[in-house]
Image (cartoon, rainbow, N blue to C red):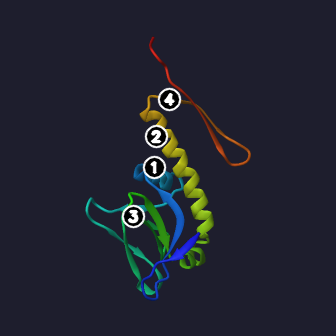
């Protein structure tokens, strides 16, 4: 699902990826070797688009002449917004490719953090042939 933001002549498009854990987003971006700038608390950073268009966001991911923005939504989630045509033509990364890569790494870090928060430790991590990641976690219980 895609929809374009309603600003006049904007080329920014929001992709259908909702995330809630900013720490997991940052770890996922680091895994993917993307440079990003995070806004200070209560502030925003600029996201660059077509012909100097700018969007305000919680994070700006540097993709060369264009950026990808991570925008804090009112419901507490984060959305990914960019001028995808610009990103794809200058960096060769499509919206679908970026979304799929980020979603997998984000989910990995989000699940791993949730397990650790509940006292589990990762015992084994396997990258499967189909591209999925299998985690085996364990929790020691004192009886």
**Residue 41 coordinates in the image, percent (x, y):** 27, 59
Q: CA distance from mark 1 to mark 3?
A: 17 Å
Q: Which residue is mark 2?
A: 113
The residues tagged by marks 2 and 4 sit, at their Cα atoms, a distance apart of 10 Å
Look at mark 4 in the image and give the residue it sits on: 121
Residue on which the image places disc 1 = 24
Q: Which residue is mark 3?
A: 73
Q: CA distance from mark 2 to mark 3?
A: 22 Å
Mark 1 and 3 residues: CB-CB less than 8 Å, in contact?
A: no
Mark 3 residue element? loop
Residue at the extreme top: 143
- Secondary structure category for the residue under label 2: helix
Q: Is residue 93 visible?
A: no
Residue in the foreground of this view, choosing between 49 and 32: 49
In the image, residue 10 above or below residue 120: below
Mark 1 or 3, closer to the camera: 3
């Amino acid at each position: 699902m895609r929809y374009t933001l309603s600003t006049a002549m904007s080329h920014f498009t929001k992709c259908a990826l909702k995330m809630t854990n900013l720490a997991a987003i940052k770890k996922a971006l680091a895994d993917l070797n993307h440079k990003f700038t995070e806004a200070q608390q209560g502030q925003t950073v600029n996201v660059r688009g077509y012909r100097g268009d700018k969007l305000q966001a919680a994070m700006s991911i540097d993709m060369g002449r264009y950026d990808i923005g991570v925008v804090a939504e009112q419901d507490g989630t984060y959305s990914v917004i960019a001028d995808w045509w610009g990103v794809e033509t200058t960096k060769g990364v499509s919206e679908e490719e970026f979304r799929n890569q980020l979603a997998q790494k984000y989910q990995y870090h989000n699940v791993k953090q949730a397990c650790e928060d509940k006292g589990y430790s990762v015992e084994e991590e396997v990258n499967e042939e189909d591209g999925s990641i299998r985690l085996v976690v364990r929790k020691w219980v004192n009886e």
